[in-house]
Image (cartoon, grey):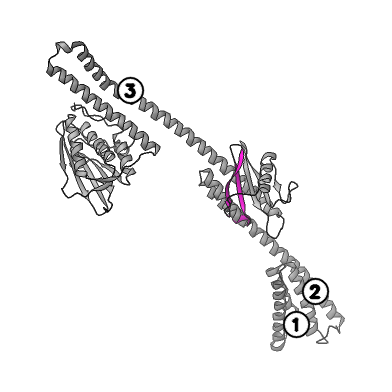
Amino acid sequence: MSPMSFLWSTAAVATALAAGWLFAALAPVPNISMVFLMAVLFAAVSFGKWPAIYASVLSFLVYNFFFIEPLYTFQVGEPQELFALIIFLMVAIVTSTLAGRVREQARAANERAGTMRRLYEFTSKLSGLTSVEAVAGGSAGEIHISLRRPAVILLDQGGELSLAAAWPPEDSLDSMTMDAARLAYTEHKSVGFDTDTLPEVNWHFVPLRTQRGTIGVLGIARDHSGVALEADARALLATLCEQTAAALERAFLVREILTARNAAETERVRNILLASVSHDFRTPLATILGSATSLLDYRDKLDPVAQNGLLREIKAEAEGLDEMVRNLLAITRIDAGALELRRDWVDLREIVQRVVNTARHRGAQAALEPHLPADVPMISADATLVEQALGNVVSNAVLHTPKGTHVAIDACVTPGAISIRVTDDGPGIPADVLPRVFEKFVRARRDATNTSDKGDGIGLGLAIAKGIVAAHGGSIGAESPVAQERGTRITLTFPREPQQ
């Protein structure tokens, strides 16, 4: 009990004495003891039972000394006065006890309400966390706030407990503490201070039990004062442990679901890739095989023009296969995060011209129109990868538009970036495909009148372009239709850096 509570109780009795003198001087009151009873009630409501009992006894003495004849003595001249004093003391003590009990009940109710509010906030916070690391960190922080003690969470990692979270932050625990945590984990019981097992340890560990078994332990540190855990604190700790275990189990389930989903997605992508590769490789390989067989079997019967034609077919199909292989290797590196950039100062006009020449050499039936101004600034980039990204975009435009389509390539220069725009006036990208156009294996229907042989048909071209541009710190976007309900525009944006 704080000494200040008794000091304030004394002040309340002194105030009642002053009020009694004032009432006696201005308008005599038949029973001034009611004023002192107010002081007792003030002490009981404000500070509890014992300060109120102290105020009752003090009021009894002050009332007797200052208001009962003979004045300024503790003697009582009339028997009825003594009886009134005893009744006052009894009423004051009973009143103070009842008021103190009500105060304690109100305090307990407030604490229960606060505990329920903290549990609700704790549960609400954990419900929004999905990763094991986030749940462990959030739980340790909330338990530290709720119990006002350092908290740690240790989880099973490959058969050994490891520190998953601590608040205040901790990197490791001493060997005795770890031994206590392992014992709590293996024996499935509370270990540490306030228990019968290893009570000398300064931590109290509780196993985290779920339907799959014990997944770890939760520990709280001994208070600096050495005070044992109260019953309410023990109940709160048990509830927090249950909530933490349930949230961790949910996080483990989410991790397993994501792992299974990733495995299924990997298998799906692998199957699509195998199917696409086998399909798209079969045609050029058949052409190469047929042309090579014709040269071997009928070379003496073929004139030089026919032989050159077969050789050109072999060369063209081999180049197409080479491009598909390069794209497959590129998407593999992009997915693995292993795309290495060999940066140098790159002239975009030269890259655009090489891409246009390559497309024309491969029989592009679209009208390719580069419109880059002579003063386009250079960028710091990997020239080979930028050419591959732009080449994929141009090949995609040529492959999916009819013969005679105009494909314009221009640039937009801003102080912080350079955008290369590839715009065609073809039929455009279907609305259901446009949001997924940069995803792997997404392919729009090829135009039936287009007979050119260029690019790949695996559906990786734009996905690779996106990965290359992102690796340079840029962005890529698609717009369709562009004008008069037709056309597609792909914009590759690269950041500008000042030349040294």
In which quadrant will I find the N terminus?
A: bottom right
Looking at marks 1 and 3 on the same chain, the residue that comes earlier in the sequence is marked by 1
Instruction: Identify the residue position indicated by label 1 in the image.
Output: 30
- Does residue 353 belong to the magenta stretch? no
Which residue appears farthest toward the bottom when viewing the image? Answer: 25
State the residue at coordinates (70%, 63%). Answer: 102
Residue 361 at x, y percent in the picture: 17, 31
Type of the residue with mark 1: Pro
- Between the residue at mark 2 and the residue at mark 3, the CA separation in whole angstroms equals 102 Å
Specify the segment rendered in magenta: 145-169
User: Identity of the amino acid at label 2?
Assistant: Leu
The residue identified by callout 3 is 278
Circle number at residue 73: none
The residue that disc 2 covers is 89
* Residue 214 location, quadrant: top right
Q: Amino acid at mark 3?
A: Ser
Asked if residue 256 lies left or right of residue 161, the reply is left
- How many other residues sit within 10 Å of disc 3, few (<14), some (14-19) or many (≥20)? few
Regarding mark 2 in the picture, which secondary structure is present there? helix
> Which of the two discs, 1 and 2, labels the residue nearer the N terminus?
1
Task: Please rate how many residues cluster around mark 1, counting C-alpha atoms within 10 Å: few if below 14, some from 14 to 19, many from 20.
Answer: few
Where is residue 320? Give x, y as percent: 25, 27
Viewer-proximal residue, 244 or 220?
Answer: 220
Q: Secondary structure at mark 3?
A: helix
Q: Marks 1/2: CA distance? A: 18 Å
Q: CA distance from mark 1 to mark 3?
A: 111 Å
